[in-house]
Amino acid sequence: MFAYEHCAYTDGMSTIEPLLAGRRAVITGGARGLGYAMAKAIAASGASIALLDRLDTVESAAARLADETGADAIGVNVDVTDEASVESAFDAVTARFGTADILVNSAGMTLGAPAIDTEVADWNRLFEVNVAGTFLTSRTFARAFVAANAGLPGAERGVASIVNVSSMSAFAVNIPQTQAAYNTSKAAVSMLTSSLAIEWLPLGIRVNAIAPGYFASDMTRDFVAENPDMAEAWISKIPSGRMGQPDELGDLVVYLASERSAYVVGQSFRIDGGYTVV
Ligand SMILES: NC(=O)c1ccc[n+]([C@@H]2O[C@H](COP(=O)([O-])OP(=O)(O)OC[C@H]3O[C@@H](n4cnc5c(N)ncnc54)[C@H](O)[C@@H]3O)[C@@H](O)[C@H]2O)c1
């Protein structure tokens, strides 16, 4: 068993750049949207990076990321709800870089439907992707990390960090759209984050989450295009007066992935322009 010294405060305020040099990161949902933006920040901080996504564009996204950041990057097709697919994707990552020590779970989907009209099959599919998918990739990552560190003396053991992507919808019912399934799934992601954080801290794996408000990603762009009055309704309720830009998540994800946040455990950080505090 690993020990709690992984939470030690080591570095004070000194600046050692790049923060993630030598680390090996996996980002699910990394082919586009917030996942790609966070991958870019992590790659720019020195980590090797694997984008995992079900989109066929995942390999070209990884090539673009390598061009933009100079990082060693690969793209791997995966369905985060399929155990065999997730295991084979992690095998591909290990073969290329060695065992991953950063995981960002950004793969997710939404379902905008009144609860009264929601079919159980649609509810279950959303939970499969947002909740079970996050669990499955986290478990696969943790098993590989623990196996790679087994038997090593304390000083040689690695540290690992998981950053889940929850939502402000875990904490507030954002209107006017109706999305009970999505809101509930993201509350589950935040509780999964806290639960795994406590269970896995002794293994050297810290788990936290980012809970974004409205960000201008590929997902929300499609939604706003289909519902043009929606952006106006959203923005009118955001104290900062605008939606977030995907690259505004970069510093937070790098911080949570790095040992600068060694004493931060099981938290879901809202980054929402103040939406949930009014
Ligand atoms: N955009 C926002 O305003 C916002 C706000 C709060 C939370 N989020 C969350 O952030 C995350 C990223 O959202 P986004 O806005 O970038 O959306 P997006 O649709 O642009 O990206 C999601 C990615 O996940 C991938 N994905 C979906 N299901 C998958 C599966 N089964 N296996 C593998 N990959 C799969 C998609 O292919 C896509 O590339 C999601 O979890 C979302 O719920 C987004």
Image (tube, rainbow, N blue to C red):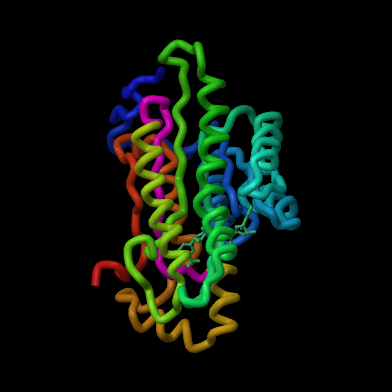
Visible in this render: residue 37?
A: no
What residue sits 48% from the left and 88% below the top? Answer: 229
Q: Residue furthest left?
A: 278
86 inside magenta stretch: no
Find out whether residue 209 is within the magenta segment.
yes
Q: Which residues are magenta?
A: 200-216
Position of 4 with respect to 83 (left or right) is: left
Q: Quadrant of the N terminus?
A: top left
Q: Residue at x 55, y 64 (%)?
A: 120
Counting from the top left corner in percent of width and height, residue 192 is at: 41, 45
Relative to 175, residue 201 above or below: above
Residue under the point 57% across and 28% down? 144
User: At which x and y percent is residue 34?
Assistant: 53, 60
Mark count = 0
Q: Nearer the viewer, residue 266 or 102?
A: 266
The quarter holding residue 202 reads top left
Q: Quadrant of ligand 1?
A: bottom right
Q: Is residue 276 above or below residue 92?
A: below
Q: Position of residue 172 (x, y in %)?
A: 33, 67
Rendered location of residue 173, percent (x, y)? 35, 71
Q: Quadrant of the C terminus?
A: bottom left
Q: Residue furthest bottom?
A: 229
Does residue 173 appear in this view? yes
Which residue is drawn at the image coordinates 45% and 76% (left, top)? 178
